[in-house]
Amino acid sequence: MREDGPPSGVDVTVPNVARMYDYYLGGKDNYAADREAAEKVIAVMPGSQAGARANRAFLMRAVRYLAAEAGITQFLDLGAGLPTRNNVHEVALSVNPDARVVYVDWDPVVCAHSRALVRTPHNVGVVEADLRRPDTILRHETTRALLDFSRPVAVMMVSILHFVDGSDDPQGIAAQYRDATAAGSHLVISHLTGDLMEKARPEETERAKEIYRRTATPVHLRTRQEVHDLFKGYDLVDPGLAWLTDWRPADPGPDGPTVVRLNDRPGGTIEEAPGYGGRIPAYAGVGRKL
């Protein structure tokens, strides 16, 4: 946990979802309000930490697929969150040293940490912006300096669109990025769903949603069809839109196989979360632009 003071202008009394996610992953870039909110979520949704790890494992598998098999060398990571192990640029550069990555986040703390992480300034850039404003990001000087939109780009929307309200038109946002990229570009999405959560554990799910409503970015669960609709204009690569841990699980990555058992907390017992059948309640997919 952080012991130094917060950056100027940052209100750390309001829980922040990026810092809560950092806490789920065992990181130290979080504050008391973040930890308190995260622990409340964990109390009602014991799989939150395992879910965060599974999401990170999916991101790694997707980037390796794109860099090694699909030949993608350019990545636009929207809502990138706080840096942790095996970030997009680390995975991509391990496959292709010519890969280029632009990280985008609206949180100044996230961006400050991301800039501090960058060791290859000719390959990696950071843009402080809101993903709901595609024009701002696509026209940003850092984006334009690193990414060539006449060639394929992988647009990463990993564990972020469930923080975009329906009134902001997430499908329209995804379409704007699609239209700005060349044929052969890819879209990567992971997204929490209510298909399991709201049916199996409705009371706990509502309590978790209430906790997130106290943050700056409430969570919005979507159905499989709603997540599928985000890929309009793309062909989904095998295995299609799948449960998070079922997307190409044969590639376990350097951290070993993804743990699908959900109640996996330090010092506690390991068991499947009741009602979920051992699944992480999230969908994941990678689409190729037609």
Image: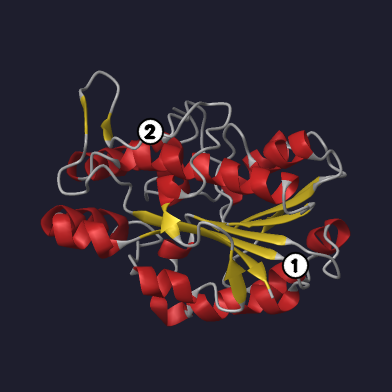
Give residue 62's mark.
none
Report if residue 165 is visible in the image: no
Q: At 60% from the left edge and 48% from the top edge, which residue is drawn?
A: 62
Query: Image quarter for residue 97?
Result: top right
Pick the front one: 12 or 217: 217
* Secondary structure category for the residue under label 1: loop
x and y percent of residue 212 in the render?
31, 56
Q: Secondary structure at mark 2?
A: loop
Going by the picture, which residue comes out furthest to the top? 267
Tell me if label 1 and label 2 are in contact, CB under 8 Å.
no
Mark 2: few/some/many CA within 10 Å (<14, 14-19, 20+): some
Q: Residue at x 11, y 57 (%)?
A: 203
Q: Nearer the viewer, residue 193 or 133?
A: 193
Image: 219 above or below 46: below
Q: Is residue 88 visible?
A: yes
- Disc 1: which residue: 184
83 relative to 200, above or below: above
Relative to 185, say whether 21 is above or below. above
**97 horizontally vs 19: left or right:** right
Q: Which quadrant of the structure image shows residue 141?
A: bottom right
Mark 2 = which residue? 259
Question: In the current view of this chain or complex, which residue is farthest to the left?
Answer: 203
CA distance separating discs 1 and 2: 32 Å
Q: In the rendered view of the protein, which quadrant contains the N terminus?
A: top left
What is the number of callouts on the image?
A: 2
How far from the left and from the top, in percent, is residue 115? Answer: 71, 42
Q: Position of residue 250 (x, y in %)?
A: 51, 38
Q: Is residue 9 above or below residue 152?
A: above
Picture quadrant where residue 200 is located: bottom left
